[in-house]
Image (tube, helix red, strand yellow):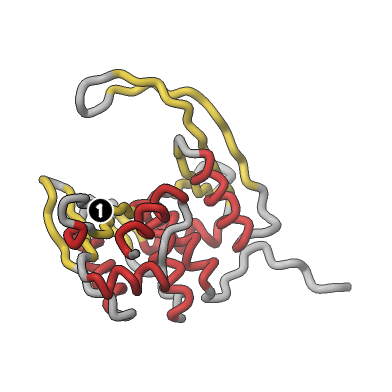
Amino acid sequence: MGRRPIEVDLTPRWELGYLLGLIMGDGSAYKNRRNYVIAFRTTSDEYAELITKAIKAVCPRLRTHRYEHNLTRRLPNGIIRTDRMIDIRFDSKIIWKIVTDNKKNYVWNVPPILTTDESILGFLAGLYDAEGFVIINKKRPCCSYIGIGFKERVNCEKVKELLSRFNIKSIVTRRSKGHYETWITNKKSKKIFKTLIGFRLSEKRKKLNMICD
């Protein structure tokens, strides 16, 4: 008999780091009576496709479920809006355990399974695709920056520490109560970020190219 195909590839490569970064940044993990579920929700078809490809790269034999529905909600400014939402879910006890062991109450740790620089770069790429952004200052281009935000300051400090491993300088700032950001403002560091981490979402990638050219 031949060897049974691997359901989850836990090799510490870019793809595993990327999927775990996406989950830590924008996903959720929960357990019901029968399943260990990893779930995402987005309004973007492009992001939904990116998530699906990331899952397949690590869990090629697992089935991914996609659901579309309308969600009506009240925004912070008081406006009531209905959006088309895309839910993506998959069932994996292995990935669920990695995530729940390393994420508690919005605070995450780098999963110990990510032992290589390649996997750490993938983890950062996943975090930035999930929660990162680019701010363009047209009047003062030198003040444009790459950012990422979290509810807990400790997450921003961890991103800063990870970036420093690759000679990317950054600062942590408090933007408002319960919201902190890590900024990359240094010109050289922005170019290193573009080369080593970057963005895969088209709008973010376009803005990154604008501030690095």
In front here: 79 or 40? Answer: 79
Specify the amino acid type for callout 1: Gly
In front here: 99 or 42? Answer: 42
The location of residue 62, given as percent across then percent down, is 66, 53
The location of residue 137, given as percent across then percent down, is 20, 52
The location of residue 47, given as percent across then percent down, is 49, 46
Mark 1 falls on what kind of element? strand
Other-residue count near label 1 (Cα within 10 Å), few / some / many at <14 / 14–19 / ≥20: many
Residue under the image location 12 percent in, 54 percent down? 174
Instruction: Please state, as top left, top right, bottom left or bottom right, where the N terminus lies in the image.
Output: bottom right
Above or below for 42 versus 109: above
Q: Quadrant of residue 132?
A: bottom left
User: Label 1: which residue?
Assistant: 149
The location of residue 201, given as percent across then percent down, is 46, 51
Relative to 4, is 137 on the left or the right? left
Relative to 3, is 84 on the left or the right? left
